[in-house]
Amino acid sequence: MRIIFLLIALICAGLVSYALYLQLADGLLPCPLCIFQRMAYWLVGITALFAFIHHPQRLGRRIYCGLIILFSLAGAIVAGRQAWLVRFPEAFECGISPEEAFLNELPLARWWPDMFEANGDCTDGTWQFLSLTIPDWSLLIFLAFSLIAGLLWRSRSISSSNLK
């Protein structure tokens, strides 16, 4: 069970690293919704890493799983909104959005602008893999994290007393 938390943390680190690669190497600028998703991946990943390090018993595991579910569902909502905007760009207002202005004023955006500064277009769906855009994949991954955390929430840990 502990290894699952480590895998979630590593997947989150890999996804955020790949997003940074797409930004810096391919010039795909993140939009405000992308930045919110990055923040959700950071929160899920750090929570999973703490759960791996802490190796909690039932109550602690449920707290960590609850946080992972919360952060994953928040990320899924944002990813779903962006996936919708990619398909229906006419529903999106052009110009600097309040979200972009808010995000770019946060200390995180000033401290690490490459990671947390929003300058892209939320309706850009040029990157695709297996006919799915980045927000589509992000939505699926966040939902998978929620499902996995939900299963971990319900599972019983294997202890030596259960093996007798």
Image (cartoon, rainbow, N blue to C red):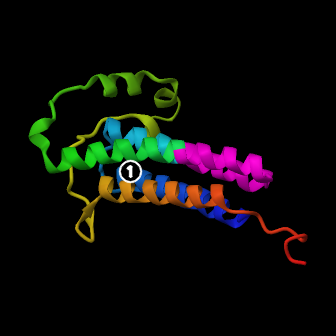
- Quadrant location, the N terminus: bottom right
Q: In front here: 53 or 140?
A: 140
Q: Residue at x 42, y 21 (%)?
A: 105
116 and 99: which is toward the camera:
99
Task: Indicate left or right for 30 with 18 as reference.
Answer: left
User: Which residue is located at x 68 percent, y 44 percent?
Assistant: 63
Say whether residue 164 is left or right of residue 116.
right
Of 162 and 68, the residue lying toward us:
162
- Give the residues in magenta: 43-69
- Quadrant for residue 42, please give it: top right
Q: Which residue is mark 1?
A: 24
Can you see residue 14? no
Position in image of residue 19 (x %, y %):
41, 53
Crowding around mark 1 (Cα neighbors within 10 Å: few <14, some 14 to 19, many 20+) is few
Judge whether 76 appears above or below 131 on screen: above
Q: Position of residue 137 (x, y in %)?
A: 35, 59
Q: Is residue 151 magenta?
A: no
Q: Tag 1, which secondary structure?
A: helix
Residue type beneath disc 1: Leu
